[in-house]
Image (cartoon, helix red, strand yellow):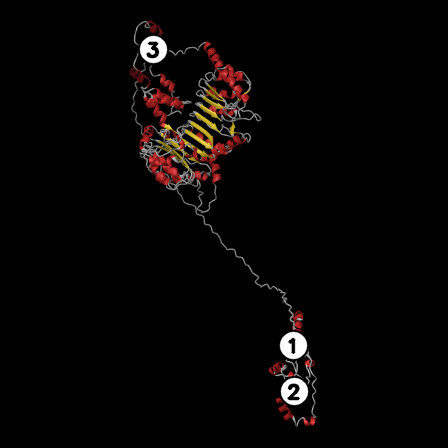
Amino acid sequence: MSSGQSLSRRSSLVDYISQIPRPRLASLRSRKSTASLKVDNYTSYAFQQQKMLPVILRDADVTQKLLETILDTPGGRRSVSRLARTCKAFKEPALNVLWRDLDSLTPLLGLFPSTLLKRARRPGLGLTKAPERDDWARVLAYAARVKSVAYVEMSGNIAPSILPMLEENRPVPYILPNLTSLTWKVETAPNLERCRMFMGPHVEAVVLEVGSKSAKINDILEEIASHRGLTSFAFTLHTNLPDTFTETFQDNVALEKLSLTAPGALASKVGKWASDLPSLKTFAVDLSARSSTAVEGFFDDISPGSGYSTPSSVGGTDSGVFSGDDVDFSEARKAAVRLTRDGPRRGAFAKLNNLTLTGEAGNLATFLKHLTSPLTQLDLIMEDPPLGIDWHDLCTVICEFADTLQSLRINATSASRFGELIRATSRGGDAPMRTLPLTYLGRLPRLWRFEVDLPESVIFEEKDIQHIAKICPNIEILRLCPMARFPLTGPPPPITMESVVPLTRDCRRLHTLAVVVNAAELESDDVYSTRVVCSRALLRLHVGHSWIKNPLQTAVLLSHLTPYLETLKYFDSKNRTGAVEANAGAWQRVAELLPHLQHIRLSERKLQPPPAPYVPPPTADKAIDATPIMFDAAVSARPEVHEMSVQAEPELVDCGVQIMPETTEVSIDATPIYVEAEVMAVVQYSEQSVDAVPETDEKGTEPMSISLAPSDTASDTSDESSQADSTAPPPSIFTPGAAATGIVNLTYRVVRFYTAPIRFMFSFMPFSMPSMPMPMPDLTKFAIHPAAGAADREAKHASAEKTHADTESPHTNGTAVIMADITPVCQ
């Protein structure tokens, strides 16, 4: 990356090392002449070390840069470790570089004695017992060299029992006393609290990612904020941001890098706090799954009273009407902003130069419209594919930073890449391919890095390449979706080898190019007729899954366009799934032919006559009298004054308004509504029968003869007869009165039961019918004329006589009729 306002490339490490003076060896002739002399060539190692120190270790920064370069090469860590074991002069610098950055705690665990480890070659499996104080000696010796360490719980390379054991048995408060950068990504609350044993006093950068909600999160944040020298902080939380987050970090004014990925990170108070950081230069925020209103709310408390939310502003939200339920004109106002570019320019983040945004293209454009910062590096992680109008707005806003923007990288979000991963693993077919127009971009004269890596928007046309060559003359690194794969059943890549000519001709600093091309037959040979299209700077070319037809012709064209090309990369079946074997074999053939063709091309150019030497124009020394001539001059500057009066009498208009309320007469019909309803009430009857047959016995009796006296003597002897009757026993008489009464009552009830419906119907008639008298039954037929009986029957009929005496039935002498006590039928 270029630094400052200069666009010149920095000198490489090789050029820097080559400037270091080296001791010159004696020539071969002088060595041959002194070979006959008997001189002891033995030199002690201490002397050689003294001679080595001024040459290699003269500058510590150069030595560190050299070791860092070795460390970045394939197998570099092993090479640096071997270098530390080989040379004592390199031991300390090599160990410092080797242990400076650790991506896991596993190397530190391997320093414990092998007797404590469950498996010596896999120290992450845990310890067999708790380490004692003497077992920490080697660990603490190398821990002092560690400057950066990372712990990722989800990786599973460290057993869960290790951290509790280290926390309980550590001999010092901080295991890594010189640690300056800590990366801690956990999912559980207990492991979150164990990061404290690594937070030494020199910590300056913290990357904290918490997967679950923890009650101790505020305590951890307060401990991080207690480091006043904190310059970098990245916080990722899957739950809501704590309410006291801004108050906790209110005093950390030394922050230069800040990254927030959490629900609630777009709150207005967070935006106010972040914009007030005086040294903030790098900022990253997640805008995913947020509305444009939420993005606008991030800047609500920044520069209040700026006038953007006035009724006259295009992008404001004030309608100018004092009402509580205003109509939402946000969409109309956004459309007006697109047309007039009258957006809020509040001056937030004045010193910000590195910005990373994640979300939809529309939200990215909305966020960038609020900034006037001198951005030099812009990283956009957006949803793919973006909407056409949002992509156009985003390109328009990016060009507003054309005076300072040097690096632009556009990548896809993890959600967009998840679909690509599913298709790659499940063989779900090829991904849909869409066009991403680059012609919306304006001129970017200072841009030296431009990278686009999207899973679906991978189609670029020839006009896009020409436009990039026109607007970015100082581009150095250009990558346009080099991982894209065009299926053989579909159309070929739109970019051909001839389409690259504008880049090699106009971009004279382009040294890295990555693009998918279609190396087909050339349409004309005009490209070989000039050397203007040749690029001296292009050294690395990455063609990915490019198509190719003629390897020899492609190699010849590349030797002409890029005679100094050093690296040609492509995908084959060994390093990339889905690669076409025919294309990979053809590009392999090009890589084999290209060095020889480049050598021939450069040799031919050397045989050409050199250009005419530059002859400067003739110069001559000539003196000129440049003494100024001074004149004094006075000017009368008396202004002319005019008086003018204007009569401003307002015109008054008298208007009268007649207001007559409208009245309406309404009448209501309040007549009640009657409804006749009939109810069918049928009485339910139950029938029951009673056995009323008396039990009778048949017995034989002797006939009784009764002689009646003459009538004339009856009255005379009445007194005597009554007295005799009172003393004589009564005759035996059987009277079935109770049985007859029960039978009559039963008959009456049966008649009333069957005549109930008729009587019910007659009850509704308006006239009253006379009751029909029922004739009394003649009970004389039930009377029995008793005959005289013998005296032995008096005892048998005593009970019957007693019953008749109780009912006080009237009876006379033997000839009288005995009436039964029967209840009348009609009462």
Q: Nearer the viewer, residue 397 or 185?
A: 185
Secondary structure under tag 3 reads: loop
Secondary structure under tag 1 reads: helix
Residue type, mark 1 in image: Ala
Gap between marks 2 and 3 measured at Cα: 184 Å
Q: Which of marks 1 and 3 is nearer the N terminus?
A: 3
Q: Which of 95 and 350 is in front in this view?
A: 95
| Residue 194 sits in quarter | top left
Residue at 52% x, 57% y: name it: 663
**Which numbered tag is attached to residue 739?**
1
Residue 688: give x, y in percent of width and height: 64, 69
Residue 464 at least partly seen: yes
Q: Earlier in the sequence, mark 2 or mark 3?
A: 3
Q: Which of 582 and 280 is in front in this view?
A: 582
* 815 sits left or right of 245 in the view: right
Residue type, mark 2 in image: Thr
Residue 808: give x, y in percent of width and height: 61, 83
Residue at mark 3: 25
Foreground disc of the pair 2, 3 = 2
User: Please, is residue 292 above or below residue 589 in the view?
Assistant: below
Residue type, mark 3 in image: Leu
Q: Earlier in the sequence, mark 1 or mark 2?
A: 1
Residue at mark 2: 812
Gap between marks 1 and 3 measured at Cα: 163 Å
Secondary structure under tag 2 reads: loop
Q: Which residue lies furthest to the front in this view?
A: 792
User: Please, is residue 163 above or below residue 37 in the view?
Assistant: below
